Structures are given as structure tokens and as C-alpha cells.
């Protein structure tokens, strides 16, 4: 039975931080509501063959408004007309003289009409229309009911009632409607009570919900982590059911899996998202190469140390902190969480090169392989993952060496470390994030299963990494990858009176190492003399 918002107000209140029991429209939202109601009234007055139009704002906008979160994405659910048909009628309405002045709208307050045609291959099974109105991204779609084949997540779609539309949704908190005509929230699934209880629950029996569309498993994880809600125990059991996990592998494209995962890791609480994936047992289903069934499975018993350690580090953004020194942008923040998710693969040996492959490239490490094939990360991020996996041991050795040198008061290794950093950073591989990956792997491998992240931090092991980064900062090596060379290949060839050849790259590295040992010197003579002195070693064909 439908429950109005007024009925909800009469229930015994349950405290829910950030949850309001009244939707207060902003001026622009009220303006949009009035505009859409006038469009509906105009259609009703000119087409008596239609069931009178009822417009509702649906799903995420309602949920977020009740939680006090502003949203600029609005789905408009229509009872008796497709989204495309409504959009075309709205365009006719807007073409009439004087519509803009009647609604206090400028000509640029309503954008071009974009049709999104039905496309079952892309999981679009009905025609919708998207348009920008008053700076809101508005999607028009008809209320619908769906039925699924056993081997597909693409449903057969038919017109439905508001209740049927609510029941087909992934979670009750996403199944609420705001009726534009009555200004009331409509609840057909118990979503309001679940919002009070901060609970993510499926409108229908969980196993049926997930078998119809297994992607809903990941969507529920995303909403739980974003909103800080708890997933209903019955839903959690169904999410880890072997039939659901198999369907998630078979029915869902890896692009869709990757998109949901990206939203999680870019979201409000990526640590909570990974924790849920871990606890529910979804890791192997997500991070897999579906084209092969013989790749190894990593040990996940201590994975929680890695993602909880990153969460702890990310909350310390003080100047000079580990996170402050290693993560410089929102994009790198996302990359960091991707790397944290892949730390269980650090100890898995790389795939072997196929015999007779000649000079073929080394195969991707499994960490990069499952990220590319399982979640379809772009090539740029795949390169960062591969580099982090290949270099983490070397990075840890550099850290240990620097810490020992500082302890024994030995000579600085500025040139050795500087050249190593430039090597790690080849192909824009974000060397700082590689260091962060090494820290997370080191923590995961150092902490026994029964100990906590705080134990690792207070054990002094993390302080070694802080010492290492402090050394890099003190030695002005944090930006060594953008260091300007004093000499180039042409200059060296001219000074040595030798034609350029394969030796040039080796000679330039010698010059750069000399620069790193002699910071502040701008005269290139010393670097060139170093090349001359080592000409035989560098195989430079000098005339005798």
C-alpha cells in the first residue's frame, strides 16, 4: 500500500543524522517543478486520449534531498507517456511564444533535447530523453515494470505503475518518489523507514533482485559506502551466493563492473567500499581475467591492513605527512585507492613469457592484468599499476638503504636515488604513488593477521618511510623528474668531436648523475669532463 509523506510524519521518529522529514525545494527546483507541471497540464488539455499525466521525481534526487544533500541530476518518471514523447511535447510547448517570460526563464535556461534511443546491447531498453533545464540534468522516462531472462541483465520493459516501478529498483532508499502534483514523498517499499534506520535493503527478495541484475550487488556496496548505511543481513547473504557471483561474472560487462568500482573509489568512503567487497567475498569476482581461468588467486587474509592503512594516512594531510607528500591531486587520490585494492597481488609472481616470443614485451603483472581485464582501467592507469608492482621491492630497498645511511651518518646517495626516481617515473608512471604502494604492501606484509594498522604505525616501521620521504624533501628530490639538464646530446657530441650514436643516452645519464652530486652548479664543464673521463666505459668512439 502506498504511504504518503504525511503518514511518515506520524511515525515514531528514529534519529538519523543528516535526515530531514521534509523536502524543501530551492527556488530553482520550485521553478522547474512549476514549469514541468505546466507542460503536463498543456499536454492533458490537448490530448484527451491519454491517461492524465502524473509526474514524479524519482530515486536518487529524493533520497539525497531527504538527507540534505543537494543534487542536480533529476529523473522524471511519467505515468502514461515515454520520456521521448514527453520531451517532444515539451519542445512544442517551449516553441510557443511567451513561454519563457511566463516561467521567468531565459532562452539559455533550457538546453537542446537529446534522445537516448532504446539499445538492449548497452542495457538501454527504453527510449529516454535528457535535457538541461535551469542548470539541472533532467532525464525523462516512463514508469515501467521489467522481466528478465536467465542469461541476461537486459530486461523486457513494459509500462508499469508507480508501485511496480519502485519494486524493480535496486534498493528501497532509491525507490522513493516526489509527486510534483501533491508535493508529497511516495513510499511503496518501506524506503523511508530504511532511511531512518540507515539501512540498504532490496525492495523484493534479495536473491531475485540480484539474479535479475547482478550489477545491483555492486550498486548496493556503492550506496552503503557513500551514505554510511548498513546493508541488510539478508541482502549480504544473497550477495555472496555462488549463483549471484557466477551471474555477476557471466551477465555483466567488465566495463559496467569497472564503472561501479570507479564510483566507489572516487566516492565519499572508498575504505568502506573495499571493506564491504572484502567482507562479502566479492574480490575474486571483480579482480579477475574473464578470458582465462588459470590465473592464481591472491591471499586476502591481510588485505584489510593495506586499505585501512591508506585510510589512516589519508586523514593526515598535514604539511610534510606521508599522504601530503605522495598524493597531489584528486586523480591521484583515486589512483591511490586503485593501488590499495591491488596490493594482494604484490607477492604473486609475474606471468611467464611465452617461449619463442623473441623480443616481445614482458607480460603484464597479474595486478595490472586483472585491473585491465576485470575492471577495464585505462592504459595510463594500467601503466601505473604495472610500474608499482615491478618497483615496490626496489623502492623498499632504497628506503632501507637511506635510513641506514642516516643512522650511520654515511655519505648521501642523492645521485643514486635521484636516478632511480627518474627510472620509476618513466612513461608518466607517478613515482610518488609507487612509493605509496610500496608502503601499503610493506604494511600488509609486516603486520600479522591478529594485529592492527595502529600497531604497524606505532611499531616504528612507518617512521622509516617518513624518514625516507624527509630525506627526499631535504635533498630537493621530490621534483627530480622535472629537473632541467645542463647539457644535451648535441653539446656533448660537439665537445667530444664525435658523431651522435647509441652512446648518447648513457652519456646523458652520467651528466645527470653529476648534476645530482653537484647541486647548484650551472656550468656544464664538470659534467662533460666526467663523460670524457668515462668515455671507454660508455663506449664512445673517440679518435685516438
Image (cartoon, rainbow, N blue to C red):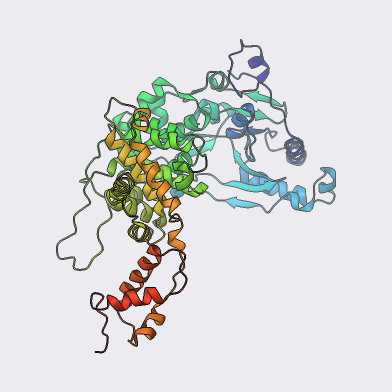
Q: Residue reaching furthest bottom?
A: 544
Foreground: 325 or 161? 325
Q: Residue reaching furthest front?
A: 409
Query: From what the image shows, is residue 162 above or below residue 38?
Result: above
Foreground: 384 or 143? 384
From the top left corner, tell me how far across and down residue 452 is, in percent.
Answer: 34, 27
Foreground: 7 or 358? 358
From the top left corner, tell me how far across and down residue 107 is, in percent.
Answer: 78, 53
- Left or right: 88 in relation to 322: right
From the top left corner, tell me how far across and down residue 240 is, in percent.
Answer: 33, 29
Marker count (numbered): 0
Task: Tell me if I can see residue 214 in this picture.
Answer: no
Foreground: 56 or 514? 514
Please identify the quadrant where the N terminus is shown: top right
Residue 499 placement: quadrant: bottom left
Please identify the quadrant where the C terminus is shown: bottom left
From the top left corner, tell me how far across and down residue 162 is, in percent.
Answer: 59, 29
Query: From what the image shows, is residue 317 above or below residue 234?
Result: below
Query: From what the image shows, is residue 104 above or below residue 276?
Result: below
Q: Residue reaching furthest top?
A: 12
- Left or right: 474 in relation to 104: left
Residue shown at 59% from the left, 27% from the top: 176
Task: Tell me if I can see residue 88 in this picture.
Answer: yes
Amino acid at each position: 500500500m502506498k504511504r504518503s509523506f504525511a503518514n511518515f510524519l506520524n511515525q515514531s521518529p528514529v534519529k538519523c543524522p543528516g535526515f530531514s522529514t521534509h523536502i524543501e525545494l530551492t527556488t530553482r527546483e520550485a521553478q522547474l517543478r512549476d514549469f514541468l507541471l505546466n507542460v503536463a497540464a498543456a499536454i492533458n488539455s490537448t490530448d484527451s486520449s491519454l491517461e492524465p499525466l502524473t509526474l514524479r521525481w524519482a530515486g536518487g534526487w529524493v533520497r539525497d534531498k531527504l538527507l540534505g544533500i543537494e543534487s542536480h541530476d533529476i529523473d522524471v518518471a511519467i505515468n502514461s507517456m515515454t520520456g521521448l514523447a514527453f520531451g517532444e511535447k515539451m519542445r512544442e510547448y517551449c516553441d510557443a511564444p511567451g513561454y519563457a517570460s511566463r516561467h521567468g526563464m531565459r532562452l539559455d535556461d533550457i538546453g537542446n533535447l537529446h534522445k537516448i534511443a532504446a539499445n538492449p546491447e548497452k542495457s538501454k531498453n527504453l527510449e529516454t530523453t535528457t535535457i538541461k533545464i535551469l542548470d539541472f540534468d533532467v532525464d525523462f522516462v516512463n514508469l515501467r515494470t521489467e522481466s528478465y531472462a536467465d542469461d541476461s541483465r537486459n530486461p523486457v520493459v513494459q509500462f508499469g505503475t508507480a508501485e511496480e516501478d519502485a519494486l524493480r529498483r535496486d534498493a528501497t532508499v532509491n525507490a522513493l518518489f516526489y509527486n510534483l502534483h501533491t508535493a508529497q514523498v511516495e513510499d511503496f517499499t518501506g524506503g523511508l523507514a530504511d532511511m531512518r534506520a540507515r539501512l540498504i535493503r532490496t525492495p523484493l527478495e534479495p536473491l531475485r533482485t540480484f539474479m535479475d541484475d547482478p550489477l545491483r550487488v555492486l550498486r548496493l556496496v556503492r550506496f552503503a559506502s557513500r551514505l554510511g548505511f548498513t546493508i541488510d543481513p539478508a541482502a549480504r547473504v544473497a550477495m555472496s551466493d555462488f549463483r549471484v557471483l557466477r551471474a555477476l561474472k557471466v551477465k555483466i560487462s567488465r566495463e559496467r563492473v569497472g564503472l561501479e568500482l570507479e564510483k566507489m573509489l572516487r566516492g565519499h568512503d572508498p575504505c568502506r567500499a573495499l571493506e564491504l567487497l572484502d567482507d562479502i567475498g566479492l574480490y575474486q569476482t571483480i579482480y579477475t581475467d574473464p578470458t582465462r581461468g588459470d590465473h592464481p588467486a591472491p591471499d586476502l587474509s591481510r588485505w584489510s591492513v593495506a586499505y585501512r592503512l591508506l585510510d589512516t594516512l589519508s586523514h593526515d594531510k598535514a604539511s610534510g605527512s606521508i599522504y601530503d607528500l605522495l598524493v597531489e591531486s584528486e586523480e591521484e587520490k583515486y589512483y591511490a585507492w586503485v593501488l590499495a585494492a591491488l596490493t594482494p597481488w604484490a607477492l604473486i609472481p609475474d606471468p611467464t613469457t611465452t617461449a619463442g616470443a623473441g623480443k616481445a614485451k614482458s607480460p603484464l603483472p597479474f595486478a595490472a592484468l586483472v585491473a585491465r581485464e576485470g575492471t577495464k582501467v585505462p592504459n595510463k592507469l594500467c601503466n601505473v599499476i604495472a610500474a608499482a608492482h615491478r618497483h615496490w621491492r626496489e623502492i623498499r630497498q632504497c628506503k632501507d638503504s637511506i635510513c641506514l645511511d642516516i643512522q650511520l651518518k654515511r655519505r648521501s646517495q642523492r645521485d643514486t636515488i635521484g636516478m632511480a626516481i627518474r627510472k620509476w617515473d618513466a612513461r608518466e608512471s607517478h613515482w610518488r604513488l609507487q612509493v605509496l604502494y610500496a608502503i601499503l604492501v610493506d604494511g600488509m606484509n609486516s603486520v600479522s593477521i591478529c594485529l592492527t594498522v595502529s600497531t604497524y604505525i606505532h611499531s616504528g616501521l612507518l617512521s622509516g618511510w617518513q624518514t625516507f620521504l624527509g630525506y627526499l624533501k631535504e635533498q630537493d628530490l621530490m621534483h627530480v623528474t622535472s629537473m632541467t639538464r645542463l647539457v644535451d646530446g648535441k653539446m656533448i657530441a660537439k665537445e667530444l668531436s664525435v658523431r651522435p650514436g647509441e652512446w648518447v643516452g648513457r652519456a646523458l645519464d652520467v651528466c645527470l648523475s653529476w648534476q645530482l652530486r653537484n647541486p647548484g652548479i650551472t656550468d656544464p664543464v664538470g659534467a662533460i669532463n666526467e663523460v670524457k673521463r668515462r668515455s671507454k666505459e660508455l663506449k664512445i668512439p673517440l679518435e685516438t
